Amino acid sequence: MKLELRGVTKKFGSLVANDRITLTVESGEIHCLLGENGAGKSTLMNVLYGLYQADEGEILLDGVVQHFSGPRDAINAGIGMVHQHFMLIPVFTVAENVMLGHEQTTFGGRLDLDASRAKVREISARFGFEIDPDAVIEDLPVGVQQRVEIIKALSRDAKVLVFDEPTAVLTPQETDELMAIMRQLKANGTSIVFITHKLREVREVADRITVIRLGAVVGEASPSASNTELASMMVGRAIDLTIAKGPELPGDVSLIVTSLSVIDSRAQYVVKNVSFEVRAGEILVIAGVQGNGQTELTEAILGLQSRVEGSITLNGEELVGRPVGGMLDAGVGFIPEDRTEDGLVAEFTIAENLMLDRSMGAPFVRWGTLQLGTLDEFAEATLIEFDIRAQGITTRVGTLSGGNQQKVVLARELSRDLRLFVAAQPTRGLDVGSIEFVHTRIVQARDSGIPVVVVSTELDEVVALADRIAVMYRGGIVGIVPANTPRDVLGLMMAGEIPEGVAA
Amino acid sequence: MSSTLSSPALAGATTSPVHEKVIVRDWKFPVALDFFALVALIIAFAIPRAGVSAFRLSTDSDVLKLAPVMMPTTSTVIVVAILLTVLAVLSHWFVLRGKVGRTPLWLTAVFAILVLFAFLTWAASGHTIQVPGLLIGTLTLSVPLIFGALGGVISERVGVVNVAIEGQLLFGAFSAAIVGTVTHSPFAGLIAAVIAGVLVSFVLAAFSIKYIVDQVIVGVVLNVLVTGLTSFFYAKVLTVDAATLNSPERFAAIDIPVLSQIPLIGPVLFRQTIIVYVMYIAIFAVWFGLFKTRWGLRVRAVGEHPTAADTVGINVKRTRFWTVSLAGAIAGIGGAYYTLDVVGSFNKEMTNGAGFIALAAVIFGRWDPIRATLAGLLFGFATNLQNALSIIGSPVPSEFMLMLPYVVTIFAVAGLVGRVRAPAASGKPYIKS
């Protein structure tokens, strides 16, 4: 099926998320939509899927103008979507999720689960998936959940399939498998729209590439274009994809984690018997697919997890069992994984956010009152030092862009006297400019002679930042390897394999 | 693992992420059982009551008559107290040595029944406990709770917290009384109760779904509004002309042939009015509807993950609106039970907090219609036990007995439920940008 978007415009208040976007996807082609986070790709696809109504422009399928008032219309017209955040009911089974919305019933209105099971098995067989129709979604790994999303779309006879940032949660191997699935779909005549900001994937699978920047189409590119060409089109200026990073000057072992285990509220070991050491002046990157215990590990280091076994010592001091305040006093700086949820108070100003973890005493609090003069001076200076683009220090943090929000978090943590710096997914969802800035600052923290622990799920970032890499899988560390370890080896380790020749 | 998969990475990806479980030893139950066993022992030895406790199992109208059971009070209580102690010790053993580190459910259930038996035997020394009356009273008190709880279950399953059950019951009772009296037809009264419940739901749904006002606040305000309105009209209109407005014809009890002849439970369950039979059907229908039909799948999807439901073409707001309305209809029937069956006229604030107990039954029943029904029966039993014992003149102060249903509710909801998962989107409005 041929899909055309003509002059689609979508506004949210004064913000123009999509500005007269025109796009053609031919039948049986993989069309990549390349753009930075926040460029308006997902908005465009939500318009296509009927979740949003376009303010202007039209959508055509095989030359016929479509009017979608909701997802049901889009589904009936043959559009399927694999969402970035999976649209699956966690407590339902695979079969129930696949049938939801177009259920078949038998006598007395009973759900025909057998028909749905058969459908799951039939589509699974076609693509070589191993999926139990009666498995409950929340028990399945994300890679498998994504396949359920694909099955769901195909069970509705989708002729145009949209993949919205599908590789964010996958291991490199799973990504390769997804590419193979896309090619197979294409061979069956399905048109595919593949939304991503990852250049390598685009070049590997795309037939055509449309680049979007700030809500508008900036041009088409061919899959043979180089990474640098694609990146500069996407960002709008020439960018350097490598990080300026001098050789490490490691000092003594500073952070020692020994046999650390974390137990979650469902009484499961989410981190199991993890041990590693980080030297002063060294970056240890913890790599792995999201959800393999990295979050809980970093939270344990900051004292945010309640059931922790084992030991964490920093310069000889034991940290396990201390309250969060004690951790901060010990000099632990922390960039949380989700800055809007755990890193900032959106309703507070920049200045207030900058003193959030220093409300216990000098210099910002004296005799129980805020020292607003000191705070303003500090905030003004920080705004300039960290290049935070805002109208002023009284701007509410919730109104800033993701990149500037992250700079506020970074500024707050790095302006303290640190003896350990922990950054969990510090560049997630940021634009390229902010990513460069955050990376530079992390390397600076290392060069100031403290141990740095970075959690990252992006292999590019892992390789760029790391002095050493620890790969986590299902709560354990698969192995700790040098920074120059080949990517395919890292990929295997992220799936729990220990390749030969790698010291576990 | 399938042998057709050659790539190790693919094979790894298709296994589920089984995390190693930690055994959590739950000491809550052993400690609670210790407490009750200790109390039983103290009562058995320190406050013994001589005499014989009788349990009557049949009424005079029964076809098959069972002989009353006579228990010597002192020795029975001592034997049961010792049994309770053994069970409490066993519970410790299960927690300490068992593979799951928990007290098994059967043990708790047996323990609870024995506690109840010991208490009744002790309290009824020298008297006779009318078991059929106790059971009939339990059902009577449970009917509104069960209707209310069913309304609560489906409403919360679709993602709207129904705090307005009390208002739905009360308005249902009020409307049934007036319409039932004016039309001289209890059926018209029943229909009026359904409509009244739906009207309360309409307000709840409109404010919480369309205008995104906090659901709990709307529910509380509705309860106050209905209480105020019905009390006003009761005082100003119904009492003035009770004969033409507040003396509805009541439903007559219908004997189900054969079933009503079953000893002990037959007369309790199958010599009832049509409202109770509607309740039996409603319990099954809500269970079947929620878990076996397209409607139920969609309702649960909307209550768990409304965005996901939206992306497969389910109209979230419309589903919520009509499901909440249905919840009101069911709760309204529970209201009619007061005026068209058990009491026979409307009184000021006659539901007396039953809607809130029903809400507790929803949670204690883990958002499941069958379990919520059992919870409603438990709360009804606790209330009725207090009535039964005050009639025979129990040694326990009546003020303490009056607390019993509420103590049971608090224990049940706070203590025994433990960690349960509500529908994920319950109480959260669905806002689409």
Image (cartoon, coloured by chain):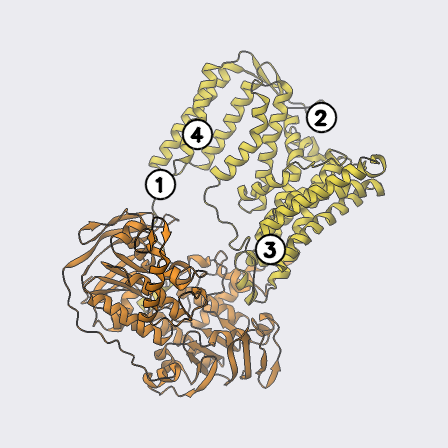
CA–CA distance between discs 4 and 1? Answer: 20 Å
The residue carrying mark 4 is B33
Label 3 SS: loop
Which disc, if any, is residue B213?
3
Query: Which mark lies nearer to you, 4 or 2?
Result: 4
Same-chain status of marks 4 and 2: yes
Q: Label 4 neighbourhood size at 10 Å, few (<14), some (14-19), many (20+)?
A: many
**Quadrant (top left, top right, bottom left, bottom right) of the C terminus of chain A:** bottom left
- Residue type at mark 2: give it: Val
Label 1 SS: loop
Nearer to us in this view, B6 or A61: A61
Same-chain status of marks 4 and 3: yes
Q: Colour of chain B?
A: yellow
Query: Which mark lies nearer to you, 2 or 3?
Result: 3
Q: Label 3 neighbourhood size at 10 Å, few (<14), some (14-19), many (20+)?
A: some
Label 2 SS: loop
Same-chain status of marks 4 and 1: yes
Q: Are marks 2 and 1 in contact (CB under 8 Å)?
A: no
Chain letter belonging to callout 4: B
Nearer to us in this view, B412 or B269: B412
On the picture, is B198 further left or further right than A141? right
- Residue type at mark 1: give it: Lys
The residue carrying mark 2 is B63
Q: Earlier in the sequence, mark 4 or mark 2?
A: 4
CA–CA distance between discs 4 and 3? Answer: 43 Å
The residue carrying mark 1 is B99
* Residue at position x 43%, y 37% in the image: B104
Same-chain status of marks 2 and 3: yes
Residue A292: image quadrant is bottom left
CA–CA distance between discs 4 and 2? Answer: 40 Å
